[in-house]
Image: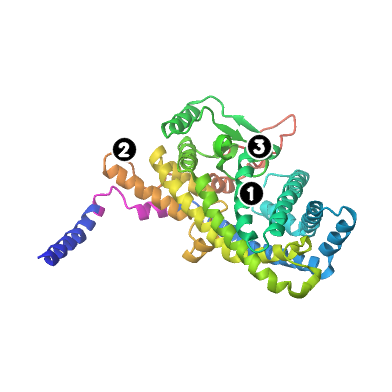
Amino acid sequence: MRLTGFAAAAVALACAAPAAAATLPFDPELATHAWLATMGEEATARSDAYFEGGYIVEYASIIVSVLVAGLFLVLGWARGVRSWLEKTVKWFPLVAFGTSFFYILVSSLLTFPFSYYVGFVREHRYDLSTQTLPQWLIEQGQGLGIGLIVGSLFLTVLYLIVRAARNTWWIWGSVVTIAFAAVMSMLFPVFIAPMFNTYTPMEQSELRDEIIAMAQANGVPATDVMVYDRSRQTNSISANVSGFGPTTRISLADTLLERGSPEAVRAVMAHEIGHYVLRHNVSGLLLSSIVILFSFAAVHFLFRGLAKNERWGIRDIADPAGLPLIVAILAVVGILTGPMDRYLTRFNELQADMFGLNAAREPDGFAEAAILLSEYRKMQPSPIEEMLFYTHPSGWTRVHNAMVWKAHEIAAGRLPASPGGPPEGWVPDFVRNREAPATPAAEAPAATTPAPEPSPAAPSN
C-alpha cells in the first residue's frame, strides 16, 4: 500500500508540474533570451573576446611569475642580497625584510611591460579605461609603494614563523595570514581606498532615501550612502562592500548612478546589502583559509624536494633567499587553488543575488545591471568556463534567476503584472552609443568656441 501511495504521489507531482508551469505569466527562458538579445552580435562578440582573452592573461601571468622567479634563482639575485644583508645588518628580521623588499621591487619592474599591456593597453583597446598614461602610472606607483611596505612586513613576519616552527609553519602561517587579511580589510576603506578614489556622501534624493531605508530594514546600521569616483579609472559600473567590523562600508560607483536606472541602482545596492547581512566578509575569510592552508601546505612539502642539497644556494625554507622559489610554487599551485577560490566567491555572490532580489524586488533592474556588466563579462559561458574562471554567476544565470523570480512573484500576486524581457526598445548604453550616428559637419550647430572633448565616463543615459 505504501509503495502504491508513493507511486500515486509521484504521478500527481509529474502531472502538477506542467500545470504549475503553465500558470506563469511568461516563460523565464524566453525572457532571458530577450534580455541577452539587446546586446546584439557585435557587443556580444566584443564582450566574449575580452573575457576569453582574460583566460590567456591569467595563465600568461603564471608563466611570467615563474620565469621571473627562475631568473632570480638562476642568477642568484636573492641569494646575493641575503648574503650582503647578513654581513651588514645581521639581524634576521631586517635580512628578511630587505630581501623581500628587493624581490617585490625588482620583480615588479621586470613584469612592468606585461602589466602595462594588461592594465593599460588592453583596457583601452576595449574602451574600458578612462585613464591617461600618466594617471595610470601614478596609480601603479602608489600600488607598488603600498605593496613594498605592506608586503615586505608581512613576509618578514611569515619568515619569523617559519624560523620558529619549521615543520608546522604552514599551519601557523595560515592563521596569521587570515588575521592579516582581516586587519587589511578593516584598514582598506579608511586608509587605502581614499588614496585611489574620493568617497563622498550621496546627494540627497528619493533614491538615496530608498537605499538607506532598504539597508535599515535589513538590519544594516546605515545612515548614509557613499559614492566613489570610479569614472577616474573606468567607465564600467560597480558597487562594493569594503571593510571589516566597524569599518564596513557599502559604496556605489558614480558610473552606476550615471549609467543605470534607479531600479538597477536599487537592485545592485540590495545585492551589496546582502553581502553585509549574510556576513560574507567573515565567511569569505573562513572559506579563503581553506585555499591558503592548501597553498602553504603545498609550499612546505614541495620546497624541500626542489631546494634539496642547497640548490640555488638556498639553505632551507627559512632562508629568505628561497622567496623566489616560494613564489614560483604558489604560482603553479594557483592553477588548482584559483578555481577553488573562485567557486567559493561565486557561492557567496549567488547568495547575495537572491537576497537582493527579495530585498529590492526589482527583477528588471537586476537584469539591466547584469546586462551592463556584460560589457566586460561573457554572458553565456560553458560550464567548464564558469567553473574555472568566474568569480560571479554568469550574466545568463543572473538574468534567468531574476526572470524566474519575477514570473513566480507575479503568479503569486506579490508583484504587478508585467511582460517578461526588457522594456520595449531598451538596449544597453554601450550598444546605443556605438550605434548612434555621428552628426554631419554640415548639420552641426555653429560654435564660437571649440567644444570640449567628451569624457569617456560621461553619463550615457
Q: Earlier in the sequence, mark 2 or mark 1?
A: 1
Which numbered tag is attached to residue 70?
none
Number of numbered discs visible in the structure rendering? 3
Residue assigned mark 2: 416
Sort mark 2 into few (<14), some (14-19) or many (20+) by Cα contacts within 10 Å.
Answer: few
Position of residue 67 in the picture relative to residue 348 (left or right)? right
Position of residue 354 in the picture relative to residue 233 (left or right)? left
Q: Do the residues labelled 1 and 3 touch (CB within 8 Å)?
A: no
Position above or below: 305 against 24: below
Q: In terms of secondary structure, where does tag 3 sit?
A: loop
Q: Do the residues labelled 2 and 1 touch (CB within 8 Å)?
A: no
Q: Which of marks 3 and 2 is nearer the N terminus?
A: 2
Residue assigned mark 1: 128
Which residue is nearer to you in this view: 166 or 180? 166
Which quarter of the rendering shows the C terminus?
Answer: top right
Outermost residue to the left: 1
Task: Residue type at mark 2: give it.
Answer: Pro
Q: In terms of secondary structure, where does tag 1 sit?
A: loop
Residue assigned mark 3: 444
Q: Where is residue 397 in the image (x, y as percent from the top left)?
A: 43, 54
Outermost residue to the right: 88
Task: Residue type at mark 1: give it.
Answer: Leu
- Whether residue 361 is visible to the viewer of this picture, yes or no, is no
